[in-house]
Amino acid sequence: NAPAGSVSTSQLAGDAVTAAKLNDDIISGQTALASEPADTDEFLVSDAGTLKRIDYSLIKGGGATELLHTATGSNVSSIDINGYFTSDYDHYKLIYSVYAATSNTDTMVRIMEGGSVITASNYWFAGQAWYYDGSTSQASQAVGFNTNYIGISSTDGTADSRYPTTGEIILSNPLSTSHITSLTTNSIGYNSVSPPTAIRTWNYAGAYNNPGTATSGISFGYMGGNIHGTIRLYGMKNS
């Protein structure tokens, strides 16, 4: 046998090192990477028997929906999410859990353009609500046409963090200049006493009627008083 260290790389044939010559700890014996790989980190794969490298960006997960931003606010006039719409997505989902600083007021959203909240009367919405207190069940409607906001819940519950209005919005075509920005939403809330004595649910659809202008963001607030809460924006991948 050749002495240890006497065989240099120039003396090894191109295909001389085979699987049989690799120890089982060839991977586990290396320093651990303690965080998610960077997009340009490389992996070794066998492509139909031929070894190739591949970037992590091509194999990482994430599915069809990706968290883009989380916005929070405590006793503020509005909670805004701006600058996160991109051409990678036509449709977005917003998950919200909010409550008002004062009870018995309506939850609303407005569109943002160029980072500014639009208060012009270009909004349409229509919605239905259902109320139940254990004995009385009642339906109601809420509508608006050429208003300066989109309602997503009405006569909204308590100013109590234990009973927020929680729901989701599907927002479509915010960057389009050939389609108006539209949304649908459903949510759960409660009546205005604390603790509440009734449960409410709302289902709304709305639109911002200003074709030709891209939407940069969305603003959450209340018709009366400030807002508390958390809103998460997800992009739904086009492909």
Image (cartoon, rainbow, N blue to C red):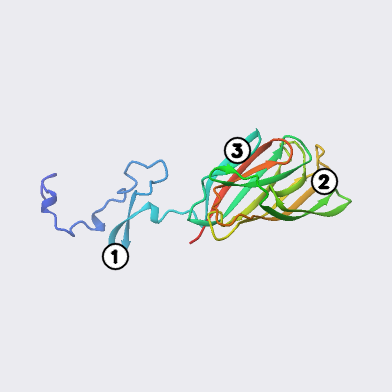
At mark 1, the secondary structure is: loop
Q: Which mark is residue 72?
A: 3
Q: Name the residue: 82% across, 38% down.
A: 193
Q: Residues within 10 Å of mark 1 (few under 14, many from 20)?
A: few
State which mark lies toward you, 1 or 3: 3
Q: Mark 1 or mark 2: name the one nearer the start of the chain.
A: 1
Q: Position of residue 97 (x, y in %)?
A: 66, 43
| Outermost residue to the right | 135
In this view, 103 is above or below 170 = above
Amino acid type of the residue tagged 3 in the rendering: Thr
Q: Position of residue 48 (x, y in %)?
A: 31, 66
Gap between marks 1 and 3 measured at Cα: 50 Å
- Write down the residue under mark 1: 49
- Write down the residue under mark 2: 198
Q: Looking at this view, is 38 or 52 the one in front? A: 38
Q: Looking at this view, is 219 or 180 the one in front? A: 180
Gap between marks 2 and 3 measured at Cα: 27 Å
| Outermost residue to the bottom | 48
Gap between marks 1 and 2 measured at Cα: 65 Å
In this view, 21 is above or below 28 = below
96 vs 127, left or right, is left
